[in-house]
Image (cartoon, rainbow, N blue to C red):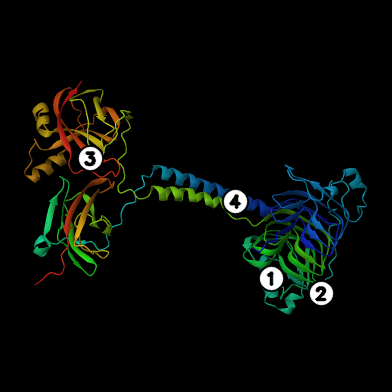
Amino acid sequence: MKKRICLIGGLIGLNNSYIKDCYAMVKLSGGQSSGGFIGCSYGEIYNSWSLTDSKRGKVMAGFAAKNEGIMEHIFYIDDRKKKKKKFADVDLEMDIAVIKQLPWDYEHCWNEAEWPPRFREDCFHIESACGDDVIEINTGKDLIEAAEGVNSGERHFQYACFRLNADIDLQGKSISPIGEDDTLPFKGIFDGGNHIIKNFKIKGKRKYGGLFGYLKDAKIINLTVDAMIQGAEYSGGIAGVMEGGIICCCGSAVRIEAKKYAGGLVGKNREGILVKDYAVGVIHKQRRPWFLLLFLIPLLLFLLKLGIPYPSIPVDGNVQAIHDGLKPEGGNTAAFEFNRLIVFTDGKGQIDFYNPGNSTQDIVVKLTISDQELIDKLGENHRTFLDQRRLSLLGDYDPSLFRQELAMTGRVPAGSRLETLGLSTLQDGTELPPGTYRGIIELVFYDSVSQEKALLNSQLPVGIEIQ
Amino acid sequence: MKRVQLTNSRSDAKYRKQHRLILSGLLLLFAVFLLLLNQWSGFLPPRHESRAQALIGASDIDERLNFQVYKLSDEYEVGFCISPLYTHDELTVYLMNYAENKVNIQIVIRDEEGNVKAQSGLLSPGEMLETIKVQPLTNASLHIEVLAYEEVTYYSAGVLRVRTAWIEALEE
């Protein structure tokens, strides 16, 4: 299987040229090799530093994961909370006293009052080399038009001198890099005018990702970007790749999802020069959304549960499991016991219903009373007016055959006991007054496994005493 | 000219905020899924039968199909042909769920070994299923099951099982 390279650097992913007076404060995560300042360098680096917080990389370094060039007057500060693994270039972590002795250019570049030193605000600027033939960019629309011009291969735009006249907020818009391909690189000058282009995204599968995709002998100055870059093989806040040219007095605040070569400022620098630049933000290796695997658990549960032929009637809340040691012995067995006189006190009746463990049926218990019994004891059937009308329309109303429900339980599974029943009112809302009545217990059987209702039900006479 | 240097990325902060929101949303969804699954019995209601049609009179059915009506409880009675006609991978059953019923019904056809050869969707009260598509039947004998479901809860309202045999073309 082909090994995937993922080289991450706080400022540059891969460099073979010249870097001076730069710093990086970028959090790094993952990748084959990651360096707080640079992933891999074959060039020269002078007077630069990094504040390094890196994790999960195979080879992690405070400053440079791999260096086969020249590095002078450089250092890093280990900003990790957990220092489980030593940085590969641990010898570059120096004492502050020693670092301060290094020849920092406090007059034209670094702010002596700050530690670690950042650029002096009054010196973080370079004069533009643009002549009179300048394309001015004032809005996001102008910027997108400029990108379209370069990407469509218009020579006028490719070699243009752009000047940014205002801060631009692209409001989270996804845009195409300027010079998105190496066959159509940007070769001109872009003067940021000390302004910022912020809140934009470079998304999707592409080779070069950054405000500029591919720079060839271009000059980018006085510009700050704040962006999110995802899915590009070469990615950097300012440019994916720079070939020749210069980037000076630029800043990059980014969140980059690294695929191959990624740097806070530039993914890959070939023969270019970087002076007085910085990068802050986060660079992490492209991750798979592993947490979506969590949703396999409910799916699995769903499939495991799926396929029962009928839903179960809920088990009665007052049911108690009993351990009578009985087990079903094949075939269908329905067995039960209950009190033949149910005494109700405060709406609760003692039934002591028992469905033994060797039964293959769950049982739902209904306590009913015939209309005839109600008429005999109370003088009327206590049905609602509408129901009276319905029955009179039927024409064959026989009060001894029509019943009203006084109580109904939930399911009483095999191997359980139900001690009490709750009494409900008659159909018209009347409570059954104290006294003794003849009731009927109706038992409805459901197969304990399939929950299939048996077509034969039992009906048994029972005494009801209301106290 | 003075110029501020950024110390963090606003795009990153925005991404983190969105990411946290999405993650908490997904976790919430996950918890809801688990909760629902925990409460779910494992039953999925059968679909409604797309070939359902209005009832016809029993007199309109050929006598040789042996149309029978079964009263299964006070709540419902069903009718169907106990000698269904088998032609072109279809069984003519005339399964009827009468309008007065308070249940939905479904028919299942099994072969001698109990393998399901056909299964209909649900018929509401007042609906009939004339024919049902079946997998090829090699043996003449078959089992017809009529499953009844309570209308709202889908609790079982009983099953009628009949062992019978299909007939081939009706001779004039």
Query: Label 2, on which residue?
Result: A132
Of the two numbered discs 3 and 2 on the same chain, state the one appearing first in sequence: 2
Question: Depth check: B166 or A173 in front?
Answer: B166
Q: Are marks 4 and 3 in contact (CB under 8 Å)?
A: no
Residue neighbourhood size for the residue with mark 3, other residues' Cα within 10 Å, grouped as few (<14), some (14–19), many (≥20)? few
Numbered disc total:
4
Question: Depth check: A318 or A145 in front?
Answer: A318
Find numbered disc 2 in the image and state the secondary structure of the residue it sits on. loop
Find numbered disc 4 in the image and state the secondary structure of the residue it sits on. helix
Find numbered disc 3 in the image and state the secondary structure of the residue it sits on. loop
Q: What's the residue at 29%, 29% (across, down)?
A: A417
Disc assigned to residue B19: 4
Amino acid type at image mark 1:
Glu
Is residue A154 shown to the viewer in this render?
yes
In space, the residues marked 1 and 4 are separated at their CA atoms by 28 Å
Of the two numbered discs 3 and 1 on the same chain, state the one appearing first in sequence: 1
**Label 3: chain?**
A
Q: Are marks 3 and 1 in contact (CB under 8 Å)?
A: no
Eye-nearest disc, 2 or 4: 4
Eye-nearest disc, 2 or 1: 1
Amino acid type at image mark 3:
Asn
Disc assigned to residue A332: 3
Find numbered disc 1 in the image and state the secondary structure of the residue it sits on. loop
On screen, residue A326 versus residue A113, left or right, reads: left
Eye-nearest disc, 4 or 3: 3
**Label 2: chain?**
A
Q: Are marks 2 and 4 in contact (CB under 8 Å)?
A: no
- Can marks 3 and 1 be said to lie on one chain? yes
Amino acid type at image mark 2:
Asp
